[in-house]
Structure formats: structure tokens, C-alpha cells
């Protein structure tokens, strides 16, 4: 029988994912020598919004929930495919550590 996650468990997973994505955004920005302001301007989002995203939030205490358009814009700023932007497990970004450069493989 397939188990359905309860609301608390689902919120916990969303919060964890949001924080890890926030680390990924921060690490990519730092690796490229960009300011938060320049990333926000290039992605056509408010600086405050981008700053909250790097914290894994959309509003204080609320996990981030960016639109597809925003994710695509951020991927464009970092010169990545959106799937690469969201693939932070292999880089160790969830631990807060900077990645080791480019992932090898599929071109």
C-alpha cells in the first residue's frame, strides 16, 4: 500500500529543498563573481526576492516557490539549463559548500 506523506512531512521536504536550492543559487552567484543585485537585474526580479531565494524563502518563514519563468530566467543568468540549475545534489550545495566546478558528462 502506497503511503501518502502527511502535511508536516511534505512541508519539511519543501523547506529542505528550498534551502538547498538557495545554497545552489548563492554558490553559483559567488562562483561567477556576481552580486545579488546583478543576478536580480539580469533575471528581471526584485533584489529583495532574489535575496530571499538565496535564504530558501519567498516570505520570511515561508519556503520559496519560484515560478517556472523565474527558474528559467535564473538558469539563463547562470548560463545553465534549468535542469542543471535544479541538480544540486551532485555538487554538495545542500551542505552549503561550494561545488567543485562543472559536472562532467552529457553535453
Image: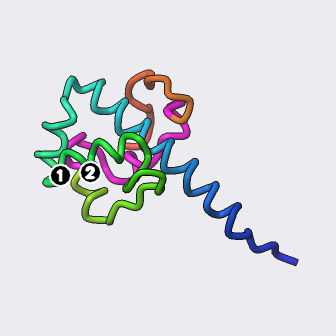
**Residue in the foreground of this view, choosing between 58 and 14:** 58
**How packed is label 1: few (under 14 Cα within 10 Å), some, or many (20 or more)?**
few
Residue under the point 13% across and 54% down: 44
Q: Quadrant of residue 36?
A: top left
Disc 1, SS: loop
Please indicate whether residue 42 sits to the left or right of residue 12 in the image.
left
Please indicate whether residue 53 sits to the left or right of residue 100 in the image.
left
**Most common SS among magenta residues:** helix
Residue under the point 29% across and 25% down: 30
| Residue 81, image x, y percentages | 31, 50
Q: Is residue 101 above or below residue 54?
A: above
Magenta residue check for 72: no
Label 1 to label 2, Cα distance in Å?
Answer: 5 Å
Residue receiving disc 1: 46
| Residue 60, image x, y percentages | 41, 51
Residue under the point 38% across and 29% down: 102
Q: Residue furthest bottom?
A: 1
| Residue 62, image x, y percentages | 47, 57
Boundaries of the magenta span: 75-93
Magenta residue check for 80: yes
Amino acid at each position: 500500500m502506497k503511503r501518502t506523506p502527511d502535511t508536516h512531512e511534505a512541508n519539511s521536504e519543501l523547506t529542505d529543498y528550498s534551502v538547498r536550492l538557495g545554497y545552489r543559487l548563492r554558490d553559483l552567484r559567488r562562483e561567477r563573481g556576481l552580486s545579488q543585485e546583478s543576478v536580480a537585474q539580469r533575471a528581471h526580479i526584485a533584489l529583495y526576492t532574489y535575496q530571499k531565494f538565496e535564504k530558501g524563502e519567498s516570505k520570511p518563514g515561508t519556503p520559496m516557490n519560484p515560478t517556472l519563468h523565474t527558474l528559467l530566467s535564473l538558469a539563463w543568468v547562470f548560463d545553465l539549463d534549468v535542469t542543471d540549475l535544479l541538480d544540486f545534489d551532485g555538487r554538495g550545495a545542500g551542505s552549503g559548500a561550494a561545488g567543485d566546478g562543472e559536472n562532467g558528462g552529457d553535453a
